[in-house]
Image (cartoon, grey):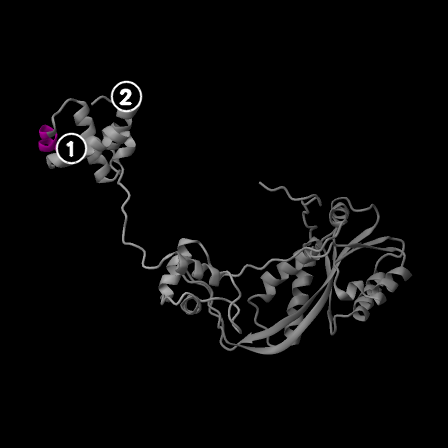
Amino acid sequence: MELTAPVRARLEKVAASATAQVRQVLRARIVLAAADGLANGAIARELEISVNTVRKWRGRFAAGGPGGLGDAKRSGRPRSYGCEVRVAVVAAATSTPPHPESTWSHRTIATRVAGTVFAAISASQVGRILADLDLKPHRVRGWLTRRETPDFWDRAADICRLYRTPPAGAVVLSVDEKTAIAARSRKHPTSAACPGTPVRQEFEYQRHGTASIVAALDVTTGEVLTEPIARNNAVTFTAFLDRLDTVIDPGKEIHVVLDNGSSHTAKHTKAWFAAHPRWHVHWTPPHASWLNQVELFFSALTRRVLRHGDFASRDDLIDKMDTYVIGHNQTAKPYRWTYDGTPLKTA
């Protein structure tokens, strides 16, 4: 048996490996010994194996080269269910579940298959068939169909240009509401964190109503003005704009970024803007409210105050939000906006 230099080097590496499988090391040593001119009996005595084993792997290597030293495929146990059963499982998993259920379970799929092809099949076998096909009917992934807006990128670019290069001498505001913020108090005190143990918070809570706020973020300074609101409608929204219009220098132009919420697009609100010509509205495209920079502030408010907060009443909730806003404004900095309003690049 003759070996080329690359094949010999590969086999010697396997034979000397401390991490390779034992059977792979043995097969490599058999072939190397045969290439050195040893007879089958001598190889068997040296490696303490049977002569038939030596013959087997010498023959496999002669027929298939290094690839012949791998394990041969085994037939395994015959399938218990034919193709028609597997097709029925897939057909059920990719169809609408029976009324009134909204998602399939392995048990309901097994019941559907039994009534379709009259083959009894267990829920666990359904699971194995679906796992083999990487089909997961119990998982639901949400998505949103984007509205056809020919000016999508124009609107996005306009807002990003406003953030990155604000007009000189103008005030740039990002305005939106955050509604239905729950005021909840835990029934038992929260335990502080300690080494190896996170903060422990009671699941059970008491409800004390909800609060809503409207916020205006000054894009150039990062400062925020918030106000509690009783209703989220156009009248309430324009009343907030009236107060902003009063406190902002009358000689300055105002650019405001708004999403397409009903209180922003109502006739009453559009009439208010028409009556105040120094206000210039920049609308985010539909389904792109993430372009409204005040959402970054709302995200921080949620993480720092609301998500794990404990509020004894609605007033307590509003007070803690106001306190956070005051502290935020003392060290406020403008957000570093990097997106430029062009289509995102994909790899």
Give amino acid for label 2. Answer: Thr
Image spot of residue 30 (x, y percent): 18, 31
Q: Is residue 31 left or right of residue 167?
A: left
Q: Is residue 207 visible?
A: yes
User: Residue 292, relative to residue 69: is it above or below?
Assistant: below
Q: Is residue 44 above or below residue 332?
A: above
**31 and 336: which is toward the camera:** 31
Q: Which residue is mark 1?
A: 55
Q: Quadrant of the N terminus?
A: top left
Majority secondary structure in the magenta region:
helix
For the record, the magenta segment spans 41-47
Looking at the figure, which quarter contains the C terminus? Answer: top right
Q: Nearer the viewer, mark 2 or mark 1?
A: 1
Mark closer to the chain start, 2 or 1 = 2
Choose between 131 and 259: the one closer to the eye: 131
User: From the viewer's perspective, is 335 left or right of 269?
Assistant: left
Foreground pick, 220 / 39: 39
Label ID, residue 4: 2
Q: Quadrant of residue 341?
A: top right
User: Tag 1, which secondary structure?
Assistant: helix
Q: Where on the picture, by quarter, is residue 145? A: bottom right
| Label 2, label 1: how far apart the Cα atoms are | 21 Å
Q: Tell me, yes or no, whether the highlighted magenta stretch contains residue 204.
A: no
Tell me the number on the disc at residue 261: none
Name which residue lies at 18% across and 35% down.
56
- Number of numbered callouts drawn: 2
Q: Residue at x 83, y 45 (%)?
A: 168
